[in-house]
């Protein structure tokens, strides 16, 4: 038991290192980019990045959960794990091709995309390279440092050369180019690490791949719905507000994403652990402990919001500080909805319930967006309130499901004891 918790601690540490980089590197380049790029150009970059999220989502298709789960079950059977990896790569390629067609069609019809066609295309190629970054494998065998290493190398490349090459609006093509180079290096490292874990990739027939896609679809639906909380709001905002306001919204959402990046290492490392142990007592202890850093975060957002945006984006972004206050519930409840999501409900095979909670909350948010659009009150304040209510609803639904299935954890706790 102690050894397993040591592995959990090591894996959590590795993912925290990765996610600290995921947090700090964008926050390091963000103040630079907001200063060297005009607000309209930065708004366009934010918009395209929001749309590329959906391409990444189609490629991932919930494999970080479904394939990880399959690998945990196939533990110590390297041949079977190799087949899972091979099938997942084939499935990602199929999905990547389909997503690319939809994405390129969007480039033809959405003005912001059409005006930055080459930028959008290079970003697409960079995203497709992520197919060969085998995060799901190394999470499944609980070698989280093999997830962190490719990521660290990739993002270090992007960080350093962004400062060197991006000087003004004319240099924005370097942003997706550096992403492409970084993902290429990460993919090469990720594949080379297969030798260390003695796993050889095996490709099986397409029919089996299609069946696995069907099985993974429930995870995809959940993840797809989750992106509505962030990416879709930016895309919809582009239909109502100026590129400058998209830039303001983009910075606030990046801060929310940064907060979630701090949450991810813990929830991701808990997932394989909870699949085996179903230790709800540990989850509840973490939930209570996190109240203290949350209080500190709330104070900073309420009383120092303008200072925060001034430091990150410069004086021209300080006026958007009020948006962070309305996003406060989203900052807080997003952690608890993640904690009681896949690491807890997924561990007791409540996959449909977990997905339902996300879809329900997402439908609520879509309805909210439609209402504020029809009432002609579509502004950043209304958008922030809508996002916060949605995150709160998601947490409440998941907490209720956990409470209703508490006996499943009690039974396993007795077995573990």
Image (cartoon, rainbow, N blue to C red):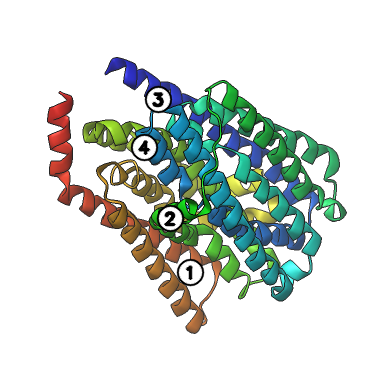
First in sequence: mark 2 or mark 4? 2
First in sequence: mark 3 or mark 1? 3
Foreground of the two, 279 or 217: 217
First in sequence: mark 1 or mark 2? 2
Q: Are marks 2 and 3 in contact (CB under 8 Å)?
A: no
Residue bearing the label numbered 3: 76
Quadrant in which residue 166 is drawn: top right
- The nearer-to-camera label among 4 and 3 is 3
* Left or right: where 49 falls relative to 256: right
How far apart marks 2 and 4 lie (CA) works out to 24 Å
Residue bearing the label numbered 1: 382
Q: Are marks 2 and 4 in contact (CB under 8 Å)?
A: no
How far apart marks 3 and 1 lie (CA) works out to 51 Å
- The nearer-to-camera label among 3 and 1 is 3
- The nearer-to-camera label among 1 and 4 is 4
Q: Are marks 3 and 1 in contact (CB under 8 Å)?
A: no
**Direction top: furthest residue:** 3
**Direction front: furthest residue:** 205
Residue bearing the label numbered 4: 271
Count of numbered labels shown in the rendering: 4
Q: Are marks 1 and 4 in contact (CB under 8 Å)?
A: no
Residue bearing the label numbered 2: 211
How far apart marks 2 and 3 lie (CA) works out to 24 Å
Up-down relation of residue 20 to residue 63 (above or below): above
- Label 3: how many Cα within 10 Å (few below 14, some 14–19, many 20+): few
Residue 149 image position (x, y, % from top left)? 60, 27
Looking at the rendered structure, the secondary structure element under dot 3 is loop
Looking at the rendered structure, the secondary structure element under dot 4 is helix
Q: Residue at x 80, y 60 (%)?
A: 118
- The nearer-to-camera label among 2 and 4 is 2
First in sequence: mark 2 or mark 3? 3
């Amino acid at each position: 038991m102690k050894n397993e918790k040591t592995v959990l601690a090591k894996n959590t540490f590795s993912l925290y290192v990765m996610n600290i980089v995921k947090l700090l590197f964008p926050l390091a380049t963000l103040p630079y980019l907001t200063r060297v790029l005009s607000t309209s150009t930065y708004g366009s970059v934010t918009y395209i990045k929001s749309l590329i999220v959906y391409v990444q989502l189609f490629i991932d298709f919930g494999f970080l959960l479904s394939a990880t789960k399959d690998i945990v079950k196939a533990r110590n059977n390297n041949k079977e794990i190799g087949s899972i990896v091979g099938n997942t790569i084939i499935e990602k390629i199929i999905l990547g091709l389909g997503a690319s067609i939809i994405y390129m069609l969007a480039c033809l019809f959405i003005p912001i995309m059409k005006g930055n066609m080459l930028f959008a295309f290079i970003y697409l190629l960079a995203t497709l390279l992520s197919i060969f970054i085998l995060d799901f494998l190394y999470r499944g065998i609980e070698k989280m440092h093999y997830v962190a290493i490719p990521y660290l190398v990739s993002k270090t490349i992007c960080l350093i050369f962004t400062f060197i090459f991006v000087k003004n609006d004319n240099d924005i093509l370097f942003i997706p180019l550096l992403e492409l180079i970084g993902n290429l290096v990460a993919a090469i490292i990720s594949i080379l690490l297969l030798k260390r874990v003695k796993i050889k990739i095996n490709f099986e027939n397409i029919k089996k791949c299609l069946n696995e896609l069907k099985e993974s679809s429930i995870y995809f639906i959940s993840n797809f719905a989750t992106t509505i909380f962030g990416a879709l709001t930016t895309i919809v905002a582009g239909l109502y507000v100026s590129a400058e306001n998209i830039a303001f919204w983009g910075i606030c959402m990046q801060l929310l994403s940064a907060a979630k990046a701090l949450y991810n290492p813990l929830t991701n490392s808990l997932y394989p652990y909870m699949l085996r142990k179903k230790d709800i007592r540990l989850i509840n202890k973490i939930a209570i402990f996190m109240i203290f850093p949350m209080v500190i975060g709330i104070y900073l957002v309420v009383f120092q919001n303008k200072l925060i945006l001034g430091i990150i984006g410069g004086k021209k972004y300080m006026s958007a500080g009020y948006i962070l206050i309305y996003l406060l519930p989203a900052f807080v409840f997003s952690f608890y909805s993640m904690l009681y999501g896949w690491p807890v409900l997924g561990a007791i095979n409540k996959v449909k319930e977990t997905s339902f909670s996300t879809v329900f909350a997402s439908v609520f948010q879509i309805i909210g967006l439609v209402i504020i659009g029809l009432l002609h009150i579509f502004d950043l304040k209304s958008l922030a309130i809508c996002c916060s209510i949605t995150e709160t609803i998601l947490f409440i639904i998941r907490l209720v499901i956990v409470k209703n299935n508490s006996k499943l954890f009690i039974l396993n706790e007795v077995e573990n004891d």
